[in-house]
Image (cartoon, rainbow, N blue to C red):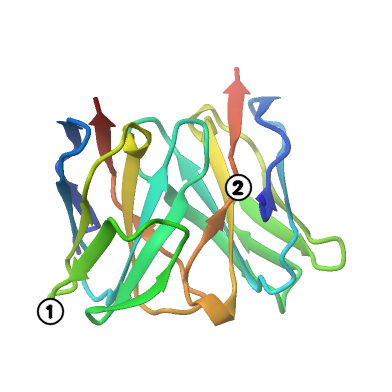
Amino acid sequence: ETGVTQSPTHLIKTRGQQVTLRCSSQSGHNTVSWYQQALGQGPQFIFQYYREEENGRGNFPPRFSGLQFPNYSSELNVNALELDDSALYLCASSPGQVNTEAFFGQGTRLTVV
Amino acid sequence: DQQVKQNSPSLSVQEGRISILNCDYTNSMFDYFLWYKKYPAEGPTFLISISSIKDKNEDGRFTVFLNKSAKHLSLHIVPSQPGDSAVYFCAASAFSTASKLTFGTGTRLQVTL
């Protein structure tokens, strides 16, 4: 059984550019969530996908968007990057939507310069 | 508005002793609580969870206690081991918002020899 994997592990982008981060969910998990973790903070919920539909969103602007594919893998897209978008982006998968553990990948460290 | 609070940014405990990590929450809709451990350059690792219908849950050296009237939970690690040194995050979710997790800011635990 493979765990949650994310790619790339590190990324440097220029302000104004666009970025796509990828996540493969754990086998058997149909729910994927994305979190942003700034330095010294806890992870902040961006959004969640369940069976290819967005199912909940946190306080992030529309330039943060995502997709979930039929195999339950997922992408996070961020347009018009800002310096404050520099953070660790975490993907988590879970076997259901409600009151269940979420299992995290190792994260993608995004630096915007 | 910080709905999940971990007021101790750090804690130092001797090997073999008990580590107690605390967490407070303000949102009375939260009904499921989790603890995660995070090492540098890794994603959070799920440790233990508790539903609001319980007041205690044990898993090996880890026990979580929930006091709903005080909106407080704690994680006990007995006995503490040097490998437990990490940042610990408390997280909460509500049935109404699916498995969106709201995290605290974390407590760094250092287990000394």
Q: Quadrant of residue B21?
A: top right
The image shows residue B60, relative to residue A48, as above or below, that is above
Q: Which residue is at 57% across, 80% downward?
A: B95
Instruction: Indicate the quadrant containing the N terminus of chain A: top left, top right, bottom left or bottom right.
Output: bottom left
Q: Quadrant of residue B38?
A: top left
The amino acid type of the residue labelled 1 equals Pro
Q: Which residue is at 49% across, 44% downward?
A: B37
Q: Residue furthest top?
A: B113
Which residue, given by chain and number where applicable, does mark 1 sit on? A70
Which residue, given by chain and number where applicable, does mark 2 sit on? B104
Q: Are marks 2 and 1 in contact (CB under 8 Å)?
A: no
Q: Residues within 10 Å of mark 1 (few under 14, many from 20)?
A: few
Query: In the figure, is residue A103 to the left or right of A66?
Result: right
Instruction: Indicate the quadrant containing the C terminus of chain A: top left, top right, bottom left or bottom right.
Output: top left
Q: Nearer the viewer, residue B34 or A54?
A: A54
Question: What chain does mark 2 sit on?
Answer: B
Query: In the figure, is residue A104 to the left or right of B107?
Result: left
Q: Residues within 10 Å of mark 2 (few under 14, many from 20)?
A: many
The image shows residue A71, relative to residue B113, as above or below, that is below
Q: Nearer the viewer, residue A78 or A34?
A: A78
